[in-house]
Image (cartoon, coloured by chain):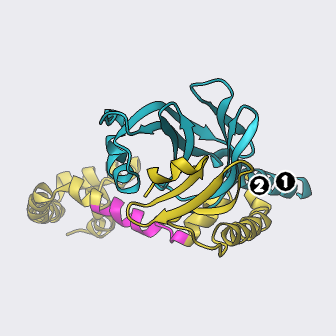
């Protein structure tokens, strides 16, 4: 190895990685023609690269890259997934109406109306389920009888127009 | 902002009060039956009432004169005309509650009230109003509701 070998060896790795400038390439290639030691050093580098590349290429060939990419995408989605509260807030922010928080009085109005309507609908009224109640009854011309049966569920209002009709009912 | 709140409030009030108005009607069926002791004819269309009529009255013959299904709306009087002129029945829905309807019923003959009554009628329940003479028998009005 000559003095110029020490100068070339500094850029030999760069030359091997194809990172040298034109001037350096000219210098190295000129030197390699006359220096078997540096040629051996370069050859050793190529052998080392070949020795490393074979198992890496083998591993790459075996690896299922679409599946890996799917895993990565799923991971990204999971990271981006928002809580229900964040989703609700973003939904409420969709319209300028909600952005101004007008929904607060609106919701309050709905609650009040629901409360009032519940009171009206489920107001305690006397239950007449299953019964027919005669609230009032008048007849200027007839005698009237009211009777109510539970089975069958029937209410009867009978008008007696004359005494001879009374025998017709039970 | 104030205008939006006002509009929202007005909308909810209107929708709230329009619901009961829209659904305030009662389906009523009025059947006019001629009951008599002439023959032993039971009208086939009265099969569903035959047991009730048999257990309540001693008549041997029941004939359906008229069958009037109708929708009653509050305070609007519906008239069922009789076979003979001047005989009619007026029914008015005067109140509607969760489990009953208040019906005002008038039975009129030649301009004179034979009966003036108000009943609370539960769904599926029947009121029988009978007694007015008709030919050799009597007329029975069967009023039933469904709502």
Characterize the local packing of mark 1: few (<14), some (14-19) or many (20 or more) Cα atoms within 10 angstroms. Answer: some
Q: Which residues are magenta?
A: A71-84
Q: Position of residue B124 (x, y in %)?
A: 46, 54
**Residues under numbered marks 2 and 1 in contact, where contact means CB atoms less than 8 Å apart:** yes
The reply to whether residue B129 is in sight is: no
Q: Which residue is mark 1?
A: B4
Give the main secondary structure of the magenta stretch.
Answer: helix
The chain painted yellow is A
Q: Residue at x 75, y 70 (%)?
A: A112
Output the chain of dot 2: A
Q: Secondary structure at mark 2?
A: helix
Q: Position of residue B65 (x, y in %)?
A: 47, 30
Query: Taking B38 as reference, is B24 left or right?
Result: right
Characterize the local packing of mark 2: few (<14), some (14-19) or many (20 or more) Cα atoms within 10 angstroms. Answer: few
Q: Residue at x 24, y 60 (%)?
A: A68
Q: Residue at x 59, y 50 (%)?
A: A160
Residue B76 among magenta residues? no
Q: Which residue is mark 2?
A: A97
Labels 2 and 1 positioned on one and the same chain: no
Question: Is residue B5 depicted above or below B38 in this figure?
Answer: below
- Please tell me whether mark 2 or mark 1 is closer to you in this view: 1
Question: Is residue B4 depicted above or below B106 in this figure?
Answer: below
The chain painted cyan is B
Q: Secondary structure at mark 1?
A: helix
- Mark 2 and mark 1: Cα distance apart in space: 9 Å
Q: Position of residue A89 (x, y in %)?
A: 63, 66
Q: Position of residue A165 (x, y in %)?
A: 52, 48
């Amino acid at each position: 190895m000559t003095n110029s070998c020490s100068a070339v060896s500094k850029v030999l790795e760069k030359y091997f990685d194809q990172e040298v400038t034109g001037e350096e390439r000219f210098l190295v290639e000129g030197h390699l023609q006359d220096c078997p030691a540096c040629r051996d050093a370069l050859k050793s580098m190529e052998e080392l690269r070949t020795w490393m590349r074979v198992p890496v290429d083998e591993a790459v060939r075996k690896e299922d890259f679409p599946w890996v990419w799917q895993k990565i995408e799923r991971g990204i989605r999971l990271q981006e997934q928002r809580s229900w509260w964040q989703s609700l807030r973003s939904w409420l922010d969709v319209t300028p109406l909600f952005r101004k928080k007008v929904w607060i009085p609106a919701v309050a109005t709905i609650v009040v109306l629901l409360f009032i309507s519940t009171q009206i609908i489920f107001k305690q009224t006397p239950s007449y389920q299953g019964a027919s109640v005669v609230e009032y009854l008048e007849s200027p011309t007839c005698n009237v009888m009211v009777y109510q049966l539970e089975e069958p569920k029937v209410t009867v209002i009978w008008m007696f127009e004359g005494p001879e009709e009374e025998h017709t009912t039970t | 902002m104030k205008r939006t709140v006002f509009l929202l409030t007005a909308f909810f009030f209107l929708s709230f009060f329009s619901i009961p108005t829209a659904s305030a009607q009662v389906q009523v069926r009025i059947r006019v039956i001629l009951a008599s002791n002439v023959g032993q004819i039971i009208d086939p269309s009265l099969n569903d009432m035959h047991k009730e009529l048999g257990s309540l009255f001693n008549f041997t013959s029941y004939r359906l004169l008229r069958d009037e299904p109708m929708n009653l709306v509050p305070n609007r009087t519906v008239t069922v005309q009789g076979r003979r002129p001047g005989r009619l029945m007026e029914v008015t829905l005067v109140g509607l509650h969760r489990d009953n309807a208040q019906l005002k019923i008038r039975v009129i003959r030649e301009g004179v009230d034979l009966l003036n009554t108000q009943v609370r009628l539960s769904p599926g329940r029947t009121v029988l109003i009978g007694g007015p003479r008709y030919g050799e028998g009597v007329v029975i009005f069967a009023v039933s509701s469904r709502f």
